[in-house]
Image (cartoon, rainbow, N blue to C red):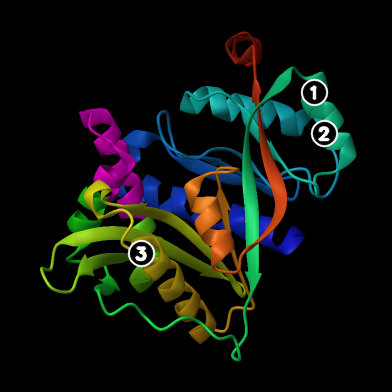
Amino acid sequence: MVRVLRVWAQDAAALASVLARQDPSWGAESFPLAGGYVVLCGAGMYVNRAIAVGLDGPLSPADWAQFEARCAAVGVAPCFETSPATDARALTQVAARGYRADGTKSALFIELGPDMVLPESDPTFVIEPANNALLSVWQATSAAGWGHVTPTAVMVSDAFAAAAAEVDGERFVVAGDRATGRPVGCASLTVREGVATLGAMSTMPAERGRGVQSALIVHRLRTAIELGCDIATTTAVPGGDSERNLLRHGFEPWFALDSHTLVDHRARASDLT
């Protein structure tokens, strides 16, 4: 568990670093802290939290001050993610400082190996890298799949996708209908230290129920095995359709990731300036 949590933190930090270079206007930054990373991609972005922080023990007063001050500078509420591996003393600090639980994700995993038997690739779909010429197709597909319709929502989604495309390279993929060529879904796969992390999967609304997600899951698992990964991981909304689909493909429930946000962060931020 600890290895995976640290990898997830490093993955998120790598994305924030690319985002900061691609578009400095977001003010993205990341820094190591207490065994993990604080990853701040910018106001309105998807990742603004402490990830795997507190694995090695409690935070010092200076650690807390740095974390909360940097969140204030970026313009986001301090959010601290915890897991069963978070040191109990750090959990006590989170509660004592006024952080309140406000969200949960399910972590899932599947063990990989060269002898693992996967379903045959679905010939209905063509899955190909979207990190270069097909990036705009991936962005449009993702936005439609997630229902992003406002200019701001699309801008956030597109910027996040552009950074992820650079981090994931050819593992950043789009699925198309073989017969017509139209895009039907998209997904990402991040690989680090033998850990394959499946993410960013969405399906065009009109294409749901055709097995698009199944095809994308199988494709990424096959890629992860080819790259020598020994475990594939992901997160999902507890009880949601994606979680049920992952479970059908052999993923197992692992642990909960809980997010805690500082309730009075504006007042606390003013105290630090």
For the record, the magenta segment spans: 142-163
Q: Of the residues shown, which amino acid type is indicated by label 3?
A: Gly
Quarter of the image that includes the C terminus: top right
Quickly name the residue at label 2: 91
As drawn, is 49 to the left or to the right of 20? right
Quarter of the image that includes the N terminus: bottom right
Labelled disc at residue 211 = 3
Labelled disc at residue 95 = 1
Give me the C-alpha separation between circle 2 and circle 3.
41 Å
Q: Given contact means CB atoms under 8 Å apart, are the residues at marks 2 and 1 in contact?
A: yes
Whether 1 is drawn above or below 78: the answer is below
Q: Nearer the viewer, residue 250 or 232?
A: 250
Q: Earlier in the sequence, mark 2 or mark 3?
A: 2
Q: Earlier in the sequence, mark 3 or mark 1?
A: 1
Percent x, y for residue 102?
63, 26
Q: Does residue 158 show up?
A: no
Q: Does residue 234 show up?
A: yes
Q: Please identify the quarter of the rendering in which residue 267 is found.
A: top right
Nearer the observer: mark 3 or 1; the answer is: 3
Q: Which residue occupies 35% across, 46% down? A: 160
Mark 3: secondary structure: loop
Q: Of the residues shown, which amino acid type is indicated by label 2?
A: Leu
Percent x, y for residue 126?
24, 75
As drawn, is 183 to the left or to the right of 159? left
